[in-house]
Image (cartoon, grey):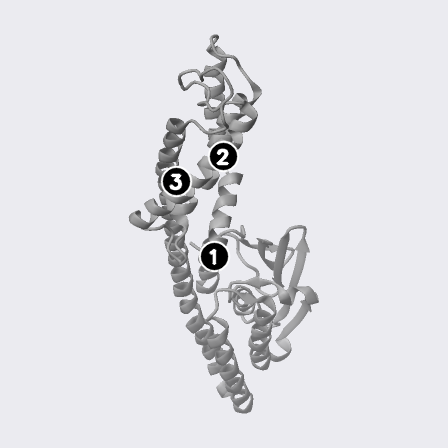
Protein backbone atom coordinates (compact mmCIF):
# COMPACT_ATOMS: atom_id res chain seq x y z
CA UNK A 1 0.00 0.00 0.00
CA UNK A 2 1.03 3.63 -0.43
CA UNK A 3 0.67 6.38 2.15
CA UNK A 4 -2.83 7.40 1.06
CA UNK A 5 -4.14 3.81 1.24
CA UNK A 6 -2.57 3.24 4.66
CA UNK A 7 -4.08 6.47 5.99
CA UNK A 8 -7.49 5.45 4.65
CA UNK A 9 -7.15 1.99 6.23
CA UNK A 10 -6.11 3.51 9.57
CA UNK A 11 -9.08 5.87 9.54
CA UNK A 12 -11.41 2.99 8.73
CA UNK A 13 -10.10 1.00 11.72
CA UNK A 14 -10.68 3.96 14.02
CA UNK A 15 -14.22 4.50 12.70
CA UNK A 16 -15.15 0.81 12.91
CA UNK A 17 -17.45 0.48 15.91
CA UNK A 18 -16.64 -3.19 16.40
CA UNK A 19 -12.94 -2.31 16.86
CA UNK A 20 -13.75 0.41 19.39
CA UNK A 21 -16.08 -1.99 21.21
CA UNK A 22 -13.27 -4.56 21.40
CA UNK A 23 -10.93 -1.93 22.92
CA UNK A 24 -13.59 -0.94 25.44
CA UNK A 25 -14.37 -4.52 26.47
CA UNK A 26 -10.75 -5.68 26.81
CA UNK A 27 -9.68 -2.48 28.54
CA UNK A 28 -12.63 -2.70 30.88
CA UNK A 29 -11.75 -6.31 31.70
CA UNK A 30 -8.18 -5.34 32.68
CA UNK A 31 -9.47 -2.48 34.83
CA UNK A 32 -11.97 -4.78 36.55
CA UNK A 33 -9.23 -7.27 37.40
CA UNK A 34 -7.11 -4.50 38.88
CA UNK A 35 -10.06 -3.17 40.86
CA UNK A 36 -10.69 -6.62 42.34
CA UNK A 37 -7.06 -6.85 43.49
CA UNK A 38 -7.38 -5.37 46.99
CA UNK A 39 -3.62 -5.67 47.65
CA UNK A 40 -2.71 -3.27 44.86
CA UNK A 41 -3.54 0.45 44.96
CA UNK A 42 -5.73 1.74 42.13
CA UNK A 43 -4.55 4.87 40.29
CA UNK A 44 -5.90 6.93 37.41
CA UNK A 45 -2.88 6.34 35.11
CA UNK A 46 -3.29 2.59 35.55
CA UNK A 47 -6.99 3.00 34.76
CA UNK A 48 -6.37 4.48 31.31
CA UNK A 49 -3.24 2.46 30.49
CA UNK A 50 -5.05 -0.64 29.07
CA UNK A 51 -7.25 1.51 26.82
CA UNK A 52 -4.27 3.51 25.51
CA UNK A 53 -2.23 0.37 24.79
CA UNK A 54 -5.09 -1.46 23.08
CA UNK A 55 -6.04 1.55 20.97
CA UNK A 56 -2.40 2.09 19.98
CA UNK A 57 -2.11 -1.56 18.92
CA UNK A 58 -5.30 -1.27 16.87
CA UNK A 59 -4.18 1.88 15.08
CA UNK A 60 -0.43 1.37 14.66
CA UNK A 61 0.39 -2.36 14.70
CA UNK A 62 -0.92 -3.18 11.15
CA UNK A 63 0.95 -0.28 9.49
CA UNK A 64 4.37 -1.97 8.95
CA UNK A 65 2.63 -4.98 7.40
CA UNK A 66 0.68 -2.71 5.04
CA UNK A 67 3.61 -0.58 3.90
CA UNK A 68 4.76 -1.90 0.53
CA UNK A 69 5.29 1.26 -1.52
CA UNK A 70 3.32 -0.22 -4.42
CA UNK A 71 -0.17 -1.59 -5.11
CA UNK A 72 0.34 -4.75 -3.06
CA UNK A 73 -2.11 -5.05 -0.18
CA UNK A 74 0.37 -6.58 2.31
CA UNK A 75 4.13 -6.82 2.70
CA UNK A 76 5.83 -10.19 2.36
CA UNK A 77 6.56 -12.14 5.55
CA UNK A 78 10.29 -11.36 5.66
CA UNK A 79 9.93 -7.69 4.89
CA UNK A 80 6.89 -7.43 7.15
CA UNK A 81 8.67 -8.91 10.18
CA UNK A 82 11.66 -6.56 9.81
CA UNK A 83 9.44 -3.52 9.38
CA UNK A 84 7.23 -4.60 12.29
CA UNK A 85 10.22 -5.13 14.62
CA UNK A 86 11.54 -1.65 13.94
CA UNK A 87 8.27 0.29 13.76
CA UNK A 88 6.40 -1.48 16.58
CA UNK A 89 9.51 -1.58 18.77
CA UNK A 90 9.91 2.18 18.34
CA UNK A 91 6.35 3.25 19.11
CA UNK A 92 5.86 0.79 21.99
CA UNK A 93 9.11 1.90 23.66
CA UNK A 94 8.20 5.56 23.22
CA UNK A 95 4.70 4.99 24.56
CA UNK A 96 5.97 3.08 27.59
CA UNK A 97 8.46 5.84 28.47
CA UNK A 98 5.77 8.51 28.18
CA UNK A 99 3.35 6.47 30.30
CA UNK A 100 6.01 5.76 32.93
CA UNK A 101 6.58 9.47 33.59
CA UNK A 102 3.20 10.30 35.20
CA UNK A 103 3.04 6.92 36.97
CA UNK A 104 6.31 7.50 38.82
CA UNK A 105 7.58 3.99 38.21
CA UNK A 106 7.39 1.44 35.42
CA UNK A 107 4.94 -1.37 35.78
CA UNK A 108 2.63 -3.70 33.94
CA UNK A 109 -1.07 -3.09 33.24
CA UNK A 110 -3.80 -4.06 35.61
CA UNK A 111 -4.40 -7.74 36.01
CA UNK A 112 -0.86 -8.75 34.99
CA UNK A 113 1.30 -9.74 38.00
CA UNK A 114 4.76 -8.20 38.25
CA UNK A 115 7.02 -7.98 41.29
CA UNK A 116 6.59 -4.71 43.21
CA UNK A 117 9.15 -2.01 42.42
CA UNK A 118 11.99 -1.57 44.90
CA UNK A 119 11.97 1.31 47.32
CA UNK A 120 13.46 4.63 46.33
CA UNK A 121 13.30 6.71 43.12
CA UNK A 122 13.65 4.99 39.77
CA UNK A 123 14.23 6.40 36.32
CA UNK A 124 11.20 6.47 33.99
CA UNK A 125 12.08 3.34 32.02
CA UNK A 126 9.51 0.82 30.86
CA UNK A 127 9.19 -2.65 32.29
CA UNK A 128 11.30 -4.53 29.76
CA UNK A 129 9.51 -7.90 29.95
CA UNK A 130 6.13 -6.24 29.52
CA UNK A 131 7.49 -4.13 26.65
CA UNK A 132 8.69 -7.32 24.91
CA UNK A 133 5.26 -8.90 25.42
CA UNK A 134 3.61 -5.87 23.81
CA UNK A 135 6.12 -5.88 20.96
CA UNK A 136 5.41 -9.53 20.22
CA UNK A 137 1.67 -8.90 20.48
CA UNK A 138 1.95 -5.91 18.11
CA UNK A 139 3.80 -8.01 15.50
CA UNK A 140 1.30 -10.87 15.62
CA UNK A 141 -1.80 -8.70 15.90
CA UNK A 142 -0.59 -6.38 13.16
CA UNK A 143 0.03 -9.31 10.82
CA UNK A 144 -3.41 -10.86 11.47
CA UNK A 145 -5.25 -7.56 11.09
CA UNK A 146 -3.32 -6.49 7.98
CA UNK A 147 -3.80 -9.92 6.41
CA UNK A 148 -7.55 -9.78 7.06
CA UNK A 149 -7.82 -6.30 5.54
CA UNK A 150 -5.76 -7.45 2.54
CA UNK A 151 -8.13 -10.38 1.94
CA UNK A 152 -11.17 -8.11 2.24
CA UNK A 153 -9.62 -5.67 -0.23
CA UNK A 154 -8.91 -8.45 -2.75
CA UNK A 155 -12.45 -9.78 -2.37
CA UNK A 156 -13.90 -6.31 -2.98
CA UNK A 157 -11.70 -5.82 -6.04
CA UNK A 158 -12.70 -9.22 -7.42
CA UNK A 159 -16.38 -8.49 -6.83
CA UNK A 160 -16.03 -5.09 -8.50
CA UNK A 161 -14.30 -6.61 -11.55
CA UNK A 162 -17.05 -9.21 -11.79
CA UNK A 163 -19.71 -6.53 -11.53
CA UNK A 164 -18.03 -4.47 -14.26
CA UNK A 165 -17.74 -7.48 -16.57
CA UNK A 166 -21.40 -8.37 -16.06
CA UNK A 167 -22.43 -4.79 -16.67
CA UNK A 168 -20.37 -4.58 -19.87
CA UNK A 169 -21.81 -7.89 -21.07
CA UNK A 170 -25.35 -6.61 -20.56
CA UNK A 171 -24.44 -3.32 -22.18
CA UNK A 172 -22.98 -5.06 -25.21
CA UNK A 173 -26.28 -6.89 -25.62
CA UNK A 174 -28.15 -3.59 -25.57
CA UNK A 175 -26.18 -1.78 -28.29
CA UNK A 176 -27.18 -4.18 -31.11
CA UNK A 177 -30.73 -4.18 -29.76
CA UNK A 178 -31.00 -0.41 -30.26
CA UNK A 179 -29.73 -0.65 -33.84
CA UNK A 180 -31.91 -3.66 -34.60
CA UNK A 181 -35.05 -1.79 -33.59
CA UNK A 182 -33.98 1.23 -35.62
CA UNK A 183 -33.44 -0.91 -38.74
CA UNK A 184 -36.80 -2.62 -38.22
CA UNK A 185 -38.54 0.77 -38.22
CA UNK A 186 -36.54 1.86 -41.26
CA UNK A 187 -37.93 -0.93 -43.43
CA UNK A 188 -41.40 0.60 -43.13
CA UNK A 189 -40.13 3.97 -44.33
CA UNK A 190 -38.25 2.65 -47.38
CA UNK A 191 -41.48 1.89 -49.25
CA UNK A 192 -43.44 4.92 -48.01
CA UNK A 193 -40.84 7.68 -48.42
CA UNK A 194 -37.43 6.73 -49.90
CA UNK A 195 -36.00 10.24 -49.46
CA UNK A 196 -36.93 10.28 -45.78
CA UNK A 197 -35.47 6.78 -45.48
CA UNK A 198 -32.16 8.10 -46.79
CA UNK A 199 -32.13 10.80 -44.09
CA UNK A 200 -32.95 8.20 -41.46
CA UNK A 201 -30.02 6.07 -42.62
CA UNK A 202 -27.71 9.07 -42.12
CA UNK A 203 -29.17 9.60 -38.65
CA UNK A 204 -28.72 5.91 -37.96
CA UNK A 205 -25.02 6.16 -38.82
CA UNK A 206 -24.68 9.11 -36.44
CA UNK A 207 -26.52 7.17 -33.74
CA UNK A 208 -24.25 4.16 -34.18
CA UNK A 209 -21.17 6.38 -33.91
CA UNK A 210 -22.48 7.88 -30.68
CA UNK A 211 -23.30 4.43 -29.30
CA UNK A 212 -19.81 3.12 -30.01
CA UNK A 213 -18.27 5.98 -28.00
CA UNK A 214 -20.97 6.30 -25.35
CA UNK A 215 -20.81 2.74 -24.10
CA UNK A 216 -17.07 2.52 -23.46
CA UNK A 217 -17.01 4.20 -20.05
CA UNK A 218 -18.36 2.78 -16.82
CA UNK A 219 -19.87 6.17 -15.99
CA UNK A 220 -20.89 8.95 -18.35
CA UNK A 221 -22.32 12.41 -17.93
CA UNK A 222 -26.08 12.57 -18.09
CA UNK A 223 -25.70 15.36 -20.63
CA UNK A 224 -24.03 12.87 -23.03
CA UNK A 225 -26.91 10.45 -22.50
CA UNK A 226 -29.37 13.26 -23.26
CA UNK A 227 -27.60 14.05 -26.55
CA UNK A 228 -27.73 10.35 -27.46
CA UNK A 229 -31.48 10.30 -26.79
CA UNK A 230 -31.93 13.47 -28.86
CA UNK A 231 -30.18 11.78 -31.80
CA UNK A 232 -32.40 8.73 -31.40
CA UNK A 233 -35.54 10.90 -31.21
CA UNK A 234 -34.49 12.85 -34.32
CA UNK A 235 -34.35 9.58 -36.25
CA UNK A 236 -37.72 8.45 -34.87
CA UNK A 237 -39.22 11.87 -35.61
CA UNK A 238 -38.37 11.45 -39.29
CA UNK A 239 -40.04 8.05 -39.29
CA UNK A 240 -43.17 8.93 -37.31
CA UNK A 241 -43.57 12.56 -38.31
CA UNK A 242 -46.42 14.36 -36.55
CA UNK A 243 -47.41 11.20 -34.73
CA UNK A 244 -44.52 11.77 -32.32
CA UNK A 245 -44.54 14.82 -30.06
CA UNK A 246 -41.68 15.23 -27.56
CA UNK A 247 -41.41 17.57 -24.59
CA UNK A 248 -38.36 18.01 -22.38
CA UNK A 249 -38.32 19.25 -18.79
CA UNK A 250 -34.59 19.24 -18.31
CA UNK A 251 -32.71 21.54 -15.88
CA UNK A 252 -29.17 22.62 -16.75
CA UNK A 253 -27.64 21.00 -13.63
CA UNK A 254 -28.78 17.54 -14.79
CA UNK A 255 -26.15 17.44 -17.56
CA UNK A 256 -23.30 17.29 -15.02
CA UNK A 257 -24.60 14.18 -13.19
CA UNK A 258 -22.78 10.87 -13.69
CA UNK A 259 -24.47 7.52 -14.23
CA UNK A 260 -23.85 4.27 -16.12
CA UNK A 261 -24.43 4.59 -19.88
CA UNK A 262 -27.65 3.64 -21.64
CA UNK A 263 -30.10 4.04 -18.78
CA UNK A 264 -32.34 6.79 -20.18
CA UNK A 265 -32.26 5.69 -23.83
CA UNK A 266 -33.94 2.27 -23.32
CA UNK A 267 -36.77 3.92 -21.37
CA UNK A 268 -37.42 6.45 -24.15
CA UNK A 269 -37.15 3.73 -26.79
CA UNK A 270 -39.66 1.60 -24.90
CA UNK A 271 -42.12 4.52 -24.80
CA UNK A 272 -41.94 4.96 -28.56
CA UNK A 273 -41.87 1.29 -29.54
CA UNK A 274 -44.68 0.09 -27.27
CA UNK A 275 -46.65 3.31 -26.75
CA UNK A 276 -46.42 5.64 -29.75
CA UNK A 277 -45.75 3.36 -32.75
CA UNK A 278 -48.70 0.96 -32.20
CA UNK A 279 -51.12 3.90 -31.90
CA UNK A 280 -52.52 5.23 -35.16
CA UNK A 281 -52.82 8.70 -33.69
CA UNK A 282 -49.34 8.58 -32.21
CA UNK A 283 -48.85 10.33 -28.90
CA UNK A 284 -46.78 12.49 -26.61
CA UNK A 285 -43.51 11.65 -24.88
CA UNK A 286 -42.41 13.72 -21.88
CA UNK A 287 -38.86 13.42 -20.52
CA UNK A 288 -38.04 15.05 -17.18
CA UNK A 289 -35.23 15.11 -14.63
CA UNK A 290 -35.94 16.25 -11.07
CA UNK A 291 -34.20 16.41 -7.71
CA UNK A 292 -36.04 15.04 -4.67
CA UNK A 293 -33.82 15.70 -1.66
CA UNK A 294 -30.91 13.26 -1.90
CA UNK A 295 -32.56 11.49 -4.85
CA UNK A 296 -32.50 12.10 -8.60
CA UNK A 297 -35.59 11.15 -10.60
CA UNK A 298 -35.70 10.52 -14.35
CA UNK A 299 -39.31 10.29 -15.53
CA UNK A 300 -40.50 9.33 -19.01
CA UNK A 301 -44.25 9.53 -19.70
CA UNK A 302 -46.04 8.62 -22.90
CA UNK A 303 -49.57 8.45 -24.22
CA UNK A 304 -50.73 6.04 -26.91
CA UNK A 305 -50.99 2.36 -26.09
CA UNK A 306 -50.97 1.86 -22.34
CA UNK A 307 -48.66 -0.44 -20.44
CA UNK A 308 -50.51 -3.41 -19.01
CA UNK A 309 -49.52 -4.07 -15.37
CA UNK A 310 -47.95 -7.48 -14.98
CA UNK A 311 -46.75 -7.62 -18.58
CA UNK A 312 -43.12 -8.83 -18.91
CA UNK A 313 -40.41 -6.30 -19.61
CA UNK A 314 -38.83 -6.37 -23.04
CA UNK A 315 -35.14 -6.80 -23.80
CA UNK A 316 -34.27 -3.14 -23.27
CA UNK A 317 -36.01 -2.66 -19.92
CA UNK A 318 -35.11 -6.15 -18.71
CA UNK A 319 -31.49 -5.35 -19.47
CA UNK A 320 -31.86 -2.03 -17.67
CA UNK A 321 -33.28 -3.67 -14.53
CA UNK A 322 -30.44 -6.21 -14.48
CA UNK A 323 -27.78 -3.50 -14.77
CA UNK A 324 -29.36 -1.44 -12.00
CA UNK A 325 -28.91 -4.38 -9.62
CA UNK A 326 -25.17 -4.25 -10.39
CA UNK A 327 -25.01 -0.51 -9.74
CA UNK A 328 -23.98 -0.77 -6.10
CA UNK A 329 -23.95 2.08 -3.62
CA UNK A 330 -26.60 4.23 -5.33
CA UNK A 331 -29.78 2.36 -4.33
CA UNK A 332 -31.17 2.72 -7.87
CA UNK A 333 -34.80 1.78 -8.52
CA UNK A 334 -36.90 1.46 -11.67
CA UNK A 335 -40.69 1.33 -11.95
CA UNK A 336 -43.17 1.17 -14.81
CA UNK A 337 -46.89 1.79 -14.35
CA UNK A 338 -50.03 2.97 -16.09
CA UNK A 339 -51.91 5.98 -14.73
CA UNK A 340 -54.79 8.00 -16.25
CA UNK A 341 -54.13 6.74 -19.75
CA UNK A 342 -50.41 7.43 -19.58
CA UNK A 343 -47.50 5.03 -19.16
CA UNK A 344 -45.03 6.35 -16.61
CA UNK A 345 -41.48 5.04 -16.22
CA UNK A 346 -39.41 6.24 -13.27
CA UNK A 347 -35.72 5.78 -12.66
CA UNK A 348 -34.50 6.93 -9.22
CA UNK A 349 -31.09 6.83 -7.62
CA UNK A 350 -29.43 8.37 -4.60
CA UNK A 351 -26.70 10.95 -5.05
CA UNK A 352 -23.28 9.82 -3.83
Q: Secondary structure at mark 2?
A: helix
Name the N-terminal-most of marks 2 and 1: 2
Crowding around mark 1 (Cα neighbors within 10 Å: few <14, some 14 to 19, many 20+) is some
Q: Tell which tag, 1 or 3, sits nearer the viewer.
A: 3
Q: Quadrant of residue 69?
A: bottom left
Question: At x 67% / y 58%, what residue is drawn?
Answer: 290
In-image side of 352 versus 21 (left or right) = right
Q: Nearer the viewer, residue 318 or 303?
A: 318
Q: Is residue 202 above or below residue 230?
A: below
Q: Is residue 55 above or below residue 268?
A: above
Question: At x 48% / y 54%, what residue is drawn?
Answer: 3
Crowding around mark 2 (Cα neighbors within 10 Å: few <14, some 14 to 19, many 20+) is some
How far separated are the C-alphas under marks 1 and 3? Answer: 43 Å
Q: Give the label on residue 261, or none.
A: none
- CB of mark 3 within 8 Å of CB of mark 2? no
Q: Residue 172: where, in percent of width, then height?
A: 41, 69
Q: Residue 175: where, in percent of width, then height?
A: 44, 71
**Looking at this rendering, what residue extends furthest in the top direction?**
38
Q: Residue 348: where, in percent of width, then height?
A: 58, 54
Q: Secondary structure at mark 3?
A: helix
Crowding around mark 3 (Cα neighbors within 10 Å: few <14, some 14 to 19, many 20+) is many
Q: Nearer the viewer, residue 276 or 226?
A: 226
Return the residue at label 1: 321
Q: Tell which tag, 3 or 2, sits nearer the viewer.
A: 2
How far separated are the C-alphas under marks 2 and 1? Answer: 55 Å
Return the residue at label 3: 142
Return the residue at label 2: 95
Amino acid sequence: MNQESIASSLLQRVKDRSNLLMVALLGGTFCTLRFLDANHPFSLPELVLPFILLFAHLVLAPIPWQWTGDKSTRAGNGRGVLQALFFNGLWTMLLFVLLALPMGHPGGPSGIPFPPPPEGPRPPLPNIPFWMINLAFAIVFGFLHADREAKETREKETAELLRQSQSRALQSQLDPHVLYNALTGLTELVYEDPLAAEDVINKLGELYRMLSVHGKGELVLLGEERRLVEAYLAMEQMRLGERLRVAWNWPAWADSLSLPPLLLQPVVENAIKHGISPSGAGGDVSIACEREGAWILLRVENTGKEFQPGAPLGIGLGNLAARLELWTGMDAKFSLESQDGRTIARLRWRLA
